Amino acid sequence: MKTLRSQRSGTAILSVRVPARLRDRLESLADATARNRSRLAVEALESYVDEQEEQLAKIDQGIRDADSGRLVSHERVKRYLQSWGSKRKLPPPSCK
């Protein structure tokens, strides 16, 4: 992967090898939506990176919660899930 930066526009050129079939699909999507491939690729990368960053942040928060003892026992979660569909559905368990 090669990256070239432009100081004026705050953008960078990113060269990435993709399977030919993916390139063809991107081209078809660009044609169908009257948008250019580059913009579609940027939107896809932004979406992917946003999702990955959010997932990592949630994992980090979960680790901090566990390290601090903010946990729900397996047994309480199991009881809650088993109550689904019954006449007496339990409220979701919460951390103490």
Image (spheres, grey):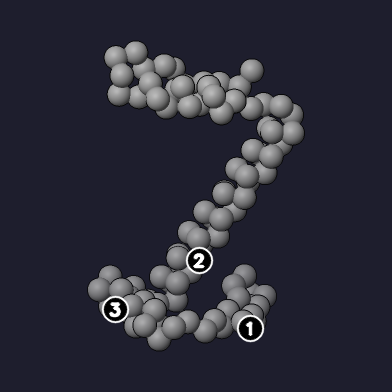
Q: How many angstroms separate mark 1 from mark 2 (CA)?
A: 16 Å
From the image, tell me which residue sits under label 2: 45
**Residue 8 vs residue 87: left or right?**
right
Amino acid type, callout 1 = Lys
The mark that comes first in sequence, 3 or 2, is 3
The residue labelled by disc 3 is: 28
Taking 50 as reference, is 9 above or below it? below
Q: CA distance from mark 3 to mark 1?
A: 25 Å
Expressed as whole percent of the image width and height from the top left, the position of residue 45 reads 50, 66
Secondary structure, mark 3, is: helix
Q: Is residue 34 among the parts visible in the rendering?
A: no
Q: Quadrant of residue 90?
A: top left
Residue shown at 50%/26% (left/top)? 77
Which residue ends up furthest to the top in the rendered image? 88
Toward the viewer: 39 or 51?
Answer: 51
Mark 2 secondary-structure assignment: helix
Q: Amino acid at mark 3?
A: Ser
Type of amino acid under label 2: Leu
Residue 20: % across, % down: 40, 86
Q: Residue at x 50, y 61 (%)?
A: 48
Q: How many marks?
A: 3
